[in-house]
Amino acid sequence: MIRRLALALALTCAVASHVMAQTMPPAWDALVAAAKREGKVVVIGPPDSEVRKNLPSAFKSRFSITVDYIGGRTNEQVAKLRAERTAGLYTTDVVISGLQTTATTFYPEKMLTPLKPALILPEVVDGSKWKRGSPWFLDPEQQYILRLSNTVQPSFYINTSIVKPSDFHSGEDLFDPKWRGKIAAQDPTVTGSGGTTGARIYVAFGEEGLKKLYIDQKPAISRDARQLTDWLLHGTYPIVLNADEDQVEQMRLEGMPIMVVYGLTHLSATLSAQYGTVSLFDSAPHPNTAKVFVNWLASKEGMEIWDRARREVPTRNDIDELSFLPKDKIPQPGIEYFDTYGWEFSTNTAEKARLLAKDLLSGTAARTK
């Protein structure tokens, strides 16, 4: 598997380098020259080992510029960045993260500078290369937060040695009393996948739906996706929300009795970018390199390396996504999806649902009138 990924990466870089070597606008050549004088770019992003290895390696191979990649959960970086800025220090150029942290922290606290004007590569500004007809910005100004991925996400998982697929036709089937004590879920009171799932239930079924699932069904709550996956595999809890998706897929391929449920009546399949949004910090210490990096990441070469490493669906239309993803992960025409990366959902609804879930689980929820 590792050798195949390395070969795919090498082929991707070779083909893309040929394309990018074609005539570029003078502004691009000047930008790259200035970036090489700066010598590096500082990027915070997800802790994934494939991303940490492949993204800096490919960028350095292409431009001879070092990527100082700081992997970790974005919310863990927030306090550090705030403290630095209070002290007048600006150490980071680019953030690759989930939308919720960027939209509720970096964006409203004015830590970002517009990214759209920095996009100058012909293949990046060419709307015909994007599935939406233009680069996909998520913020209201359509300037700051660029979406790199758009992937169909599981609604939940079942152990088919205990639960039959035919038991589920509607999202409301999760509330059936026969499943009481047989469901496990990630903590809906914290930001991340657990909070997003709770908010998804809230959008579909209101506060009553949150109560039915997280109180009446007496689910096991964990913040550890691997523990949830282990419970699913062993049938301890045969219905699991928010298991480790990669681990589940590996178990399924090995013949384990695991099934992914993507969407049901009244609970449509969801779309997510996961960590796949990119933004530029203002007062960046390496502003030219930062601009080269985001252009490259939005190009066919950069986005394919990113989405292959993350196993996500690219927002460009010139990448062979079926070469590294199952069809179930790719949004299909004619199917209704719920986008958990919608601005209103990410900036308001998700937080409202999280606080409601926190009140419910603490036993202090006020009854909705």
Image (cartoon, grey):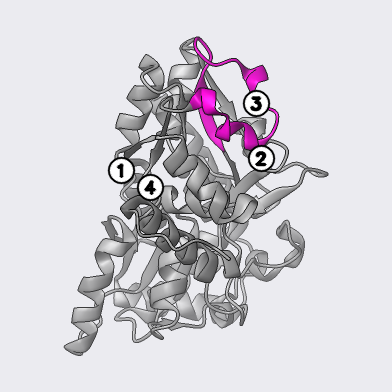
Instruction: Reply above or below: 188 against 119.
Output: above
Measure the C-alpha gap from mark 1 to mark 3.
25 Å
Name the residue beneath numbered marker 4: 51
- Amino acid at pointer 2: Ile
Tag of residue 168: 3
Measure the C-alpha gap from mark 3 to mark 2.
22 Å
Instruction: Reply above or below: 59 against 197.
Output: below
Q: Nearer the viewer, mark 1 or mark 3?
A: 3
Q: Nearer the viewer, mark 2 or mark 1?
A: 1
Measure the C-alpha gap from mark 4 to mark 3.
36 Å
Instruction: Reply above or below: 24 against 181.
Output: below
SS type, badge 4: helix
In the image, 369 versus 308, the foreground residue is 369
Q: Nearer the viewer, mark 1 or mark 4?
A: 1
Q: Would you say 19 lies left or right of 312 here?
A: right
> Which region of the structure is painted magenta?
154-179
